[in-house]
Image (cartoon, rainbow, N blue to C red):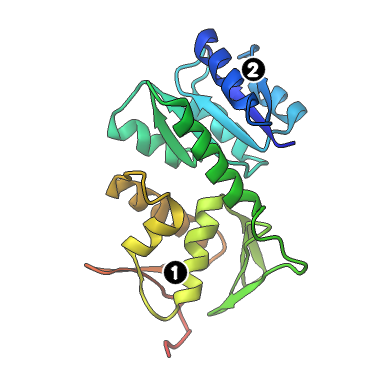
Amino acid sequence: MQKIMIIEDDAKIASLLQTHIEKYGYDVYRVNDFEHVADEFHHYKPDLVLLDINLPSFDGFYWCRQIRKDSICPVLFLSARDGEMDQVMALENGGDDYITKPFYYEVVLAKIRSHLRRAYGEYAAKAEERILHTAGIILYPERMELAYEETMTVLTAKEASIIEMLMERYPRVASREALLEKLWDSQTYVDENTLNVNIARVRKKFQEIGAMEAVETVRGAGYRLNVPGEEKR
């Protein structure tokens, strides 16, 4: 049974979310001690987190950063804030999605299913681990790890998906439309800036492993893998 953690200080919203999600066979845990969210996360070990931004003591951005120190599980922000910068900050601090209150519970459930499917690949189990090699870069999609010249870094699910498409398309361009379609449900409107933020995060991951300028912007088309020293075919 997959486990969902709810970090929401509005008891009514948290209770309604828990009741609705449990109807569909998930194990749900509500955080009540907002001083020790990280401790409860490590104890429960959820497969996915629903995280509010406005919380006592520390906000959701802070707790998302703590979670990201040693976990790549999907984190879906829930917030009454509908400003563009709040959504950007949620993504930049390690979030995978942003749901604005008030919301439909069926939409929340659909996003939970979608992120669980993408993060853990329950529809695409493979006997052998997939390993992608392109232009000196090595991607381990199931582990969500990226390596280059013996240096490795951990990725989020969306970062791994973006890099996988760039590697599969190399040396061709991965269009913005194709990336959006791969990363988000087609019926969900996604602001253009959301993809920009995720691309920026991918660039930082490449920089961490020494592959500088690895993501090239092709104006009006999309993005292309560009590793120095590798001649395009």
Q: Quadrant of residue 101?
A: top left
Figure label count: 2
In the displayed orientation, state which residue is furthest to the bottom: 233
Q: Residue at x 56, y 41 (%)?
A: 113
Q: Quadrant of the C terminus?
A: bottom left
Q: Quadrant of residue 98?
A: top left
Q: Is residue 87 above or below residue 119?
A: above
Give the percent coordinates (x, y) of residue 45. 73, 33
Amino acid type, label 1: Ala
In the displayed orientation, state which residue is furthest to the top: 11
As measured in the structure, the alpha-carbon distance from the residue carrying label 2 to the one carrying label 1 is 40 Å
The residue at which mark 2 appears reads as: 31
Q: Quadrant of residue 22?
A: top right
Q: Is residue 49 above or below residue 30?
A: below
Q: Residue at x 39, y 61 (%)?
A: 179
Q: Quadrant of the N terminus?
A: top right
Which numbered circle lies on residue 214? 1
Q: Residue at x 43, y 41 (%)?
A: 92
Mark 2 crowd level (few <14, some 14–19, many ≥20, 10 Å Cα): some
Q: Residue at x 55, y 29 (%)?
A: 50
Give the percent coordinates (x, y) of residue 108. 48, 31
Residue 112 visible to an observer of this rendering: yes
- The answer to whether the residue labelled 2 contacts the one labelled 1, judged by CB atoms less than 8 Å apart, is no
Amino acid type, label 2: Val
Disc with the residue nearer the chain's start (2 vs 1): 2
Q: Is residue 230 above or below residue 152?
A: below
Which numbered circle lies on residue 170? none
Numbered disc in front, either 2 or 1: 2
